[in-house]
Amino acid sequence: MKHSDDTFFQHSRTPALDDLEPNLCHEAWVQYKATGQKGWDLSGSNPTQTSLPSIHPDPDIMRAAIDAPYEASSQGLDVARRAIAEMYDGLVDPARIQLFASTSEAIGALLKLLCAPGDNVVTCTPTYPLLDCLTALEGVSLLEVPLQDCAGIWAVDLWALERTCSPNTRALLLVSPNNPTGHLVSRDEMAALVEFCAQRAMALIVDEVFSTYCLRQDGDAMPKAAAAHFSSPRDGLIVSLNGLSKVCGLPQHKLGWGIFGGAPNIVHEAMQRMSFITDSTLSVSGWVQRMTPYFLSHRDDFAQPCLARLRQNLATLESYAQKDNVQWRLDRVQGGWSACLRLPARADDMAICAHLASRGVRVFPGSFFDFREKQPACILSLITEPDCLDHGLQILTHELESLL
């Protein structure tokens, strides 16, 4: 019996190939670059493609890490977990740290831990678009609850969360600082979310990859390693995620981690079950784990210059936002590597970003991040080279003035 080609993939968790076609913004940028012009890419978030300093390992230490005998560990080598715990100034117990190859892998493993196919998890939007892919690949539905938006100041909407969650909701996925809004969850918000999730037997997963980069000293912001601040029997399960990619600017050295907190008996069982999952792949490279103490001890070699650039670029944006006839508004940025330029409600951000790309300026539309229909925005990266940002903003501001 002969089958059509698509018969092989009719039950695949991957999207239809039509959904993988390039979008208008990408096509416009490719066409512009084909003319041989450099353009002004304000969207880049890969630190290894910027002039920010890199952490270069000592060759002898590197060689020793590579040559060390292989030691299989489903939780991750003790030497790496101790170094991560030290980064949090004694707040975190190394025994409550689980290593992964990335925070994306960590989310996938947590979905395996918590969900059966057909279950759902919930997140607050706007947020990182990869969550759609990660949940779909695990056979889990992603529910979305819009953050409350008060003139560019964001907050979690507990009432909307309560109305959205169902008996099959297994976790709340939260990004703080948020990508792309820069919103930081406050202490009070986090405590309320911990209680909300625990009452419903839902885990709270907090992606903290940008927590090193707080741009406003808000006294009520939840500190790093949120999971380590909750250990009551009533606290359920909280997992804080981070990794070398943002902490050290080393996305090529694949290492992420999860800090497990909450009710001690639940944390104990969760980590035992997670060891079963991670033991099936043992995906984290041994040499990276052995190099973790070195990388983390040198993290300020990258993080401090990166933080200085973020502040410089944010100041540039704030200066532009004060000019007359500017057709965008800068949202308040508390932390992270992104900034949101809000457009008039009538604007089509996809069409506008495609037009900007055709003029040599690359930014992302807010619709990529699930901004709502009446919340058009342009999203740009704060680790962009400062001169590139300045030139790009001049063109962007001029083009928006003529369009809007």
Image (cartoon, rainbow, N blue to C red):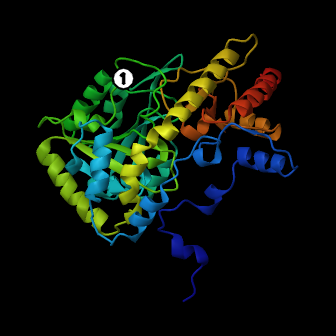
Q: How many marks?
A: 1
Q: Residue 151: image x %, image y %?
A: 53, 16
Dot 1 falls on a residue whose secondary structure is: loop
Task: Check the image and name the residue furthest to the front.
Answer: 60
Q: Residue 385: image x %, image y %?
A: 68, 35
Q: Residue 10: image x %, image y %?
A: 51, 69
Q: In the rendered view, does 262 fall on the left or right side of 104?
A: left
Query: Which residue is more in the foreground, 16 or 246?
Result: 246
List the residue tagged with mark 1.
221
Which residue is located at x 81 percent, y 44 percent?
38
User: Dividing the image into 4 quarters, which one contains the C terminus?
Assistant: top right
Query: Which residue is more in the foreground, 364 or 10?
Result: 364
Q: Residue 146: image x %, image y %?
A: 45, 30
Answer with the quarter of the image where residue 284 lies. bottom left
Query: Which residue is more in the foreground, 365 or 296?
Result: 296
Q: In the rendered view, does 330 fall on the left or right side of 207?
A: right
Position of residue 150 relative to residue 71, above or below, is above
Q: In the rendered view, does 147 fall on the left or right side of 203?
A: right
Q: Mark 1: which amino acid?
A: Ala
User: Dividing the image into 4 quarters, which one contains the N terminus?
Assistant: bottom right
Position of residue 288 relative to residue 149, above or below, is below
